[in-house]
Image (spheres, rainbow, N blue to C red):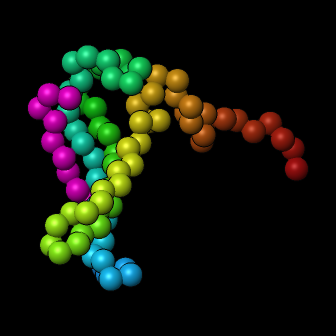
Amino acid sequence: MPDAGKCTFLFLADMHEGNIWTAAVGEIKGEMTSPWLGIPPGHGVRRLRFGEFCRFEQCRIAEIRCLYDILVQSPLRIFEFVGKRRMNTVF
């Protein structure tokens, strides 16, 4: 995504088993100009939600774990039916 920007909504830090861990949640915003992971480029700004976790040792990042919510951007729309399905069940 050219001209992408990262916006962090929540940032936490704490000690665990002698290491400092940080956690951040937010979104990356930008315009897609070419397909990415089977997701076609769209018009306007796309948002990609993320979660990242970092472990520090001696004031340096020793490990990073990232999660990206690509299912929302997927052309398959796997979870689109949630909340839109009509229930025809009589109780």
Q: Answer with left or right where residue 60 lies relative to residue 81.
A: left
- Residue 29 locus on image (x, y percent): 22, 38
* 86 and 9: which is toward the camera: 9
User: In what quadrant of the picture does the N terminus appear?
Assistant: top left
Q: Residue at x 29, y 38 (%)?
A: 47
Q: Answer with left or right where residue 33 lies relative to residue 37.
A: left
Residue at the farthest left position:
3
- Residue 26 locus on image (x, y percent): 28, 53
- Residue 74 locus on image (x, y percent): 45, 28
Residue 10 lies in the magenta stretch: yes
Q: Residue at x 37, y 80 (%)?
A: 16
Count of labels in the image: 0
Picture quadrant of residue 55:
bottom left
Picture quadrant of residue 31:
top left
Q: Residue at x 75, y 39 (%)?
A: 87
Residue at the farthest right position:
91
Picture quadrant of residue 19:
bottom left
Query: Mainly helix, strand or loop, the magenta region?
Result: strand
Q: In this view of the protein, can residue 22 be seen by the observer? A: no
Q: In this view of the protein, can residue 40 be seen by the observer? A: yes
- Residue 56 locus on image (x, y percent): 24, 70
Q: In the figure, 10 relative to 31: above or below? A: below
Q: In the figure, 1 relative to 83: above or below? A: above
Residue 3 lies in the magenta stretch: yes
* 28 and 64: which is toward the camera: 64
**Residue extent of the magenta highlight:** 1-11
Q: Residue at x 16, y 36 (%)?
A: 4
